[in-house]
């Protein structure tokens, strides 16, 4: 259970009692009621149980094509701004503009606290040495790094910050050792550091310091998705590590602070790109195997980590090339691969856009592209392209090929005794999130009335609704073993390109528009599928039995049930990196939270019901649907009664639980700065709220 704020007001105390009652008394299931006659008859038939019905999904591409259209529109907005540039002054203003937009996406920099650098060991080699360095990017938040320093150099040498891709062993991965060592042999100082959740910086470990969930992508999603609740972005956390790495490298007496570049591959290519956007001290950059366009990634159904998707970026008209434009006109080479899943067409498009900008800035030779012939990775041909580019900038070497390398065992490069900072009991990303959640709860207090309505509308980014939605009458559903023998599906258009699938149950055959039967109606907002839940969810039967004279409607919001996407891989929907995550993270880049879009669907369906004369709606919702149902019930006047099953107890519970089961599609950015779900539940007490079996952070009763 989530801790209550220390400051208590009468309303806080009242809600504490109400919430305790919800979690104890109202937790009980609805009173068991006898089966409806036709169901009892069906279940009483002797013999084997009926064969399972294939799921209904008549709109499997709807969500994908909607997002493709949205991302294309965002790209068009950005391209229009680029085409409008005609002069050097225009280009310079554009660079300043994208810098400001990127800061909007990433948020303000945290306080520059002491680095507290310490060298825990040195590895001596023939032409260089490797110092094992630990510095604190935030208080109590250590970064493990290897500093490769060329030996026998009388003058200060250029420096490079190396950022790692998604290797479980971080800086010790062969390809990343290779570029760091290759740079050192050519005369550069290279500081390569472990990313959060990789190498020696696992955030979730077992007692033996082995990963609890899996290094890299999995840790990034667990920590990063949760951070959105408190207004943080994992991309900024990771970029801040890179900025502090630059701060540290600039203090080294061996390094020329005016010549420090940045390079990395894959997830490190992401960080190189983002670091160009948020930090302009770099003298040169070489992102590898990341830069393409957001449109190519969307059209190709390519999910990317939480930190690879900056909030609001698409809404602001930004694309990958803009993060590099923020460093213009400094020298940048974009490194890609012909056979990479980061589409080489997008690599060429990004380069073409930057070439025009650099031309206007009178620096056409400062932007280049190299596309290697092989698959994803910082392979030798791409590393050599990077060496040649950096040498052209610094003149430190005229080498065009990679020198011979010696790859070290992981343990040789460890900065800690056992290969994990967790052995020292340091703070984790989760602990920062938990602490901020508790701080926001204490500052926020109870939210109610108009303030709650505004907060819900603002956080969900709900658009204005205009008029009654149009709808289609779909083919008669036939026998689906629903609680009533007949049903019709109505596709309610809540916005262009989006249909909310509404079923209306009938006791007689019906093939046309819904009849006007009076003010009262039941609306069930499904968890995952109205079709399945009409057969399997006892709550549906219970409310229909309790109100047999009220027409029953059900609702599949976008992305579930009849519009569940079949994208991003076979049966990927429930995977951490699957289609549901894919659209949820793009929704944040479009500045329209996926849950806000789903709530908009419920509100549109309620408008449609109101137009049918149903101005007294008993809204019933389950699980994921209970979130959209809750917000719609708070906002829509036609909802007069609310029953929620498996509703989330509080967003604060998710933010303050190291492990949680709710997907990104169920979370809202910075919600805990404005309100929490208990505020909504308290407001709905006036609408006869009943909560059955609320779910905690792990989606358990």
Image (spheres, rainbow, N blue to C red):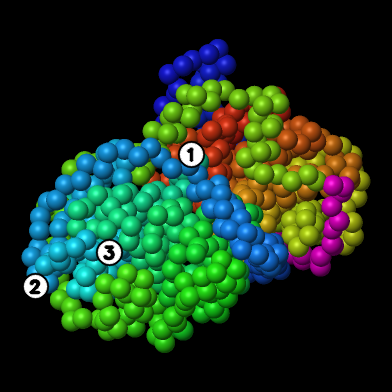
Residue 364 vertical placement versus 434 (above, below): below
Residues drawn in magenta: 466-481
Distance, label 2 to label 3, CA atoms, is 20 Å
Q: Position of residue 267 (x, y in %)?
A: 39, 64
Q: SS class of the residue under badge 3? A: strand
Q: Tell me if mark 3 has few (under 14), some (14-19) or many (20+) residues whose alpha carbon lies within 10 angstroms of its own.
A: many
Residue holding disc 3 = 158
Residue holding disc 2 = 126
Residue visible at 40% across and 55% down in the picture:
281
* Mark 2 or 3, nearer chain start: 2
Q: Is residue 689 left or right of residue 368?
A: right
* In front of the other: 434 or 26: 434
Q: Tell me if mark 2 has few (under 14), some (14-19) or many (20+) residues whose alpha carbon lies within 10 angstroms of its own.
A: few
* Mark 1 or 3, nearer chain start: 3
Q: Position of residue 99 (x, y in %)?
A: 54, 53
- Of tags 2 and 3, the one toward the viewer is 3
* Mark 2 or 1, nearer chain start: 2
Q: Is residue 225 left or right of residue 317?
A: left
Residue 41 vertical placement versus 353 (above, below): above
Distance, label 2 to label 1, CA atoms, is 49 Å
**In the rendered image, which quarter is residue 428 located in?**
top left
Q: Is residue 152 left or right of residue 606?
A: left
Residue holding disc 1 = 230
Q: Position of residue 26 (x, y in %)?
A: 56, 29
């Amino acid at each position: 259970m989530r801790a209550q704020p220390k400051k208590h007001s009468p309303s806080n105390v009242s809600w504490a009692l109400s919430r305790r009652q919800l979690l104890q008394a109202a937790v009980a299931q609805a009173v068991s009621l006898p089966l409806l006659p036709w169901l009892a008859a069906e279940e009483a038939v002797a013999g084997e149980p009926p064969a399972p019905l294939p799921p209904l999904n008549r709109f499997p591409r709807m969500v994908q094509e909607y997002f493709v259209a949205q991302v294309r529109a965002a790209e068009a907005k950005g391209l229009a701004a680029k085409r409008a540039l005609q002069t050097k002054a225009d280009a310079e203003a554009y660079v300043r503009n994208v810098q400001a937009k990127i800061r909007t996406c990433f948020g303000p920099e945290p306080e520059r606290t002491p680095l507290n650098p310490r060298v825990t060991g040195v590895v001596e080699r023939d032409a260089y040495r490797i110092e094992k360095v630990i510095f604190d990017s935030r208080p109590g938040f250590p970064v493990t790094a290897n500093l490769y320093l060329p030996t026998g150099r009388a003058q200060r040498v250029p420096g490079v910050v190396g950022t790692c891709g998604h290797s479980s062993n971080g800086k010790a991965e062969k390809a990343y050792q290779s570029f760091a060592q290759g740079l050192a042999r050519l005369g550069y100082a290279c500081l390569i550091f472990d990313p959060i959740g990789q190498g020696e910086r696992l955030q979730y470990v077992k007692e033996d310091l082995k990963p609890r969930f899996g290094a890299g992508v999995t840790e990034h999603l667990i920590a990063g998705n949760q951070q959105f609740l408190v207004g943080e972005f994992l991309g900024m956390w990771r970029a801040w590590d890179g900025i502090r790495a630059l701060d540290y490298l600039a203090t080294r007496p061996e390094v020329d602070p005016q010549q420090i570049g940045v390079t990395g591959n894959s997830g490190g290519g992401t960080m190189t790109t983002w670091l160009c956007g948020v930090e302009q001290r770099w003298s040169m950059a070489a992102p590898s195997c990341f830069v393409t366009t957001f449109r190519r990634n969307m059209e190709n159904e390519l999910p990317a980590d939480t930190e690879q998707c900056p909030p609001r970026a698409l809404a602001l008209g930004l694309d990958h090339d803009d993060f590099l434009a923020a460093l213009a006109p400094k020298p940048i080479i974009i490194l890609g691969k012909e056979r990479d899943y980061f589409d080489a067409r997008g690599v060429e498009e990004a380069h073409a856009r930057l070439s025009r900008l650099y031309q206007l800035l009178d620096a056409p030779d400062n932007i280049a592209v190299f596309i290697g012939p092989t698959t994803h990775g910082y392979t030798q041909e791409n590393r050599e392209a990077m060496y040649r580019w950096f040498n052209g900038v610094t003149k430190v070497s005229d080498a065009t090929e990679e020198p011979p390398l010696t790859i070290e065992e992981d343990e040789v490069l460890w900065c800690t005794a056992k290969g994990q900072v967790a052995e020292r009991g340091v703070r984790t990303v989760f602990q920062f999130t938990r602490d901020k959640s508790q701080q926001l709860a204490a500052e926020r207090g109870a939210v109610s009335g108009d303030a709650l309505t505004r907060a819900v509308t603002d956080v969900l980014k709900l658009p204005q609704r205009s008029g009654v939605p149009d709808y289609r009458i779909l083919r008669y559903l036939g026998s689906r073993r629903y609680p009533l023998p007949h049903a019709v599906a109505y596709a309610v258009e809540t916005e262009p390109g989006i249909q909310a699938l509404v079923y209306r149950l009938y006791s007689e055959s019906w093939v046309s528009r819904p009849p006007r039967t009076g003010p009262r109606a039941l609306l069930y907002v499904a968890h995952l599928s109205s079709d399945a839940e009409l057969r399997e969810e006892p709550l549906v039967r219970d409310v229909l039995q309790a109100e047999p004279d009220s027409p029953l409607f059900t609702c599949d919001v976008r992305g579930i049930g009849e519009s569940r996407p079949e994208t991003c891989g076979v049966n990927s929907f429930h995977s951490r990196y699957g289609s549901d995550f894919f659209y949820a993270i793009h929704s944040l880049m479009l500045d329209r939270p996926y849950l806000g879009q789903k709530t908009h669907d419920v509100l549109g369906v309620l408008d449609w019901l109101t137009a049918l004369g149903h101005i007294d709606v008993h809204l019933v919702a389950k699980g994921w649907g209970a979130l959209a149902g809750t917000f719609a019930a708070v906002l829509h006047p036609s909802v007069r009664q609310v029953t929620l099953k498996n509703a989330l107890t509080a967003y604060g519970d998710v933010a303050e639980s190291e492990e949680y089961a709710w997907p990104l599609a169920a979370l809202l950015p910075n919600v805990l700065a404005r309100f929490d779900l208990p505020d909504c539940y308290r407001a709905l007490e006036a609408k006869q709220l009943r909560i059955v079996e609320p779910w905690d952070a792990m989606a358990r009763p």
